[in-house]
Amino acid sequence: MRFNSSIGLFGKARRLLPGGVSSPVRAISPCPFYTARAKGPYLWDADGNRFIDHCLAYGPMILGHRHPAVEAAVEKQLEKGWLYGTPSEIEIQMAERIAGHYPSMQMMRFVSTGAEATMAALRVARGATGRNKIIKIEGGFHGAHDSVLVKAGSGATTLGIPDSRGVPVDTAKNTLQVPFNDPEALEKTLSSFPEEIACLIIEPVLGNIGPVLPQEGYLKSVRDLTKENDVLLIFDEVITGFRLGLGGAQELYGVTPDLTTLGKIIGGGFPIGVFGGRRDLMEQVAPSGGIYQAGTFNGSPVSLAAGMATLDILEGDSTLEKLNRASDEMRESLKEMVEDLDLGYSVVGIASLFKVFFGPEPHNYSEALKCDKAGYLEFFHRMLRKGVFITPSQFETDFISTAHSREVLEATLEAFRSCLKS
Ligand SMILES: *Cc1c(COP(=O)(O)O)cnc(C)c1O
């Protein structure tokens, strides 16, 4: 496998783009491959190499690349124009659909990214309660903005930067941290700052330090404790929404948050985010209330058209059930493989999320950090040379799409088998 074109492009990029990339996790050491095109479960790079894609743009591409129905919906929208600066009916259609699957989202606002959605949801929580402090989970990732860029998982963890320079101390001090799967720690933090905490923001399944699953009853205790302490609960379902099931983690685990953020899948691969929740909270968002949020690209018709077409497919013909079943089988095969090797590795996941951890199954951030990060990177490169693109970090989740047929998943498993052995 040759990477000459990618090496040349990366050389040029490094003079123009910090680290040669537009987002840190893409800076695969020593050189990322440059994607030239994508279709179904595959990416082709600038040198003509083909990879089975299990990164899937870190979550949005649940139908694989260039799904014909999504492509057709986007083309149809383009014929009608792609940005208006006025309301358009598709916003109402999408809001009705989302509210149908997420009854907790009685009202919502469309924005352009997941990061904007969490930023605005936190503002709503602070604005509605009149309190400054928030709690987040160690290793929880909610986008790269000031309030949540503390022990944030994703690229920051991969690069070993726990906090970012440039985040004001006065902001970071309002962000309290608790470990995942630890109701006692949450209870202690809640009682240490009575009437100072606006909300807890949590990924119901951590997705940005690899998948880390909530233990039995954990999310219910999170709901009970926040309610008892009069603190709002925000579920960040940017990854889990429309993936764990149509109703996301809140439906699967039967826990109702006050506010929810969605993104990724609901834009069908185009930029999007949405935040929403209890009517009494969302009515405080401008222009109906005094909590400000605005954006040129809010409710982009193209993103919504791609998202609607994606939801059509996910809702029809038990698509998600089939995808989840295929993913369960794949994780089972991986588990057997890993157990046979007896290296102390683990296979973790749910629905169409999976990860091979180079260590025992983690239940929180500090346990995830104990995995063999360097060993994983070496393994990543071996997989790439076998034609399989898994995420380039121990701390990013791998994904499966509906375009990954049985044969494709078999090829992935074969690559795992041969790379894990060596
Ligand atoms: C990706 C992600 C975000 C940020 O979404 P962007 O669209 O990248 O801004 C927020 N929260 C979670 C859980 C995510 O996985």
Image (cartoon, grey):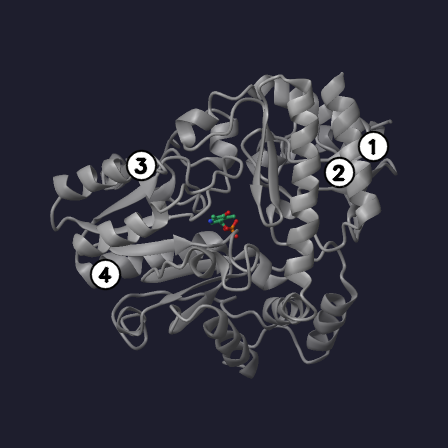
Q: Are marks 2 and 3 in contact (CB under 8 Å)?
A: no
Q: Secondary structure at mark 2?
A: loop
Q: Amino acid at mark 3?
A: Asp
User: For mark 2, what is the residue?
Assistant: 34
Q: Is mark 2 within 8 Å of ligand 1?
A: no
Residue 61 seen from this side? no
Q: How many marks?
A: 4
User: For mark 1, what is the residue?
Assistant: 5
- The residues bearing labels 4 and 1 have C-alpha atoms spaced at a distance of 50 Å
Q: Are marks 4 and 3 in contact (CB under 8 Å)?
A: no
Earlier in the chain: of badge 4 and badge 3, it is 4
- Residue 304 occupies quadrant: bottom right
Q: Which mark is residue 182?
A: 3
- The residues bearing labels 2 and 4 have C-alpha atoms spaced at a distance of 43 Å
- Residue 69 occupies quadrant: bottom right
- Residue 156 x, y percent position in the rendering: 47, 32
Q: Secondary structure at mark 4?
A: helix
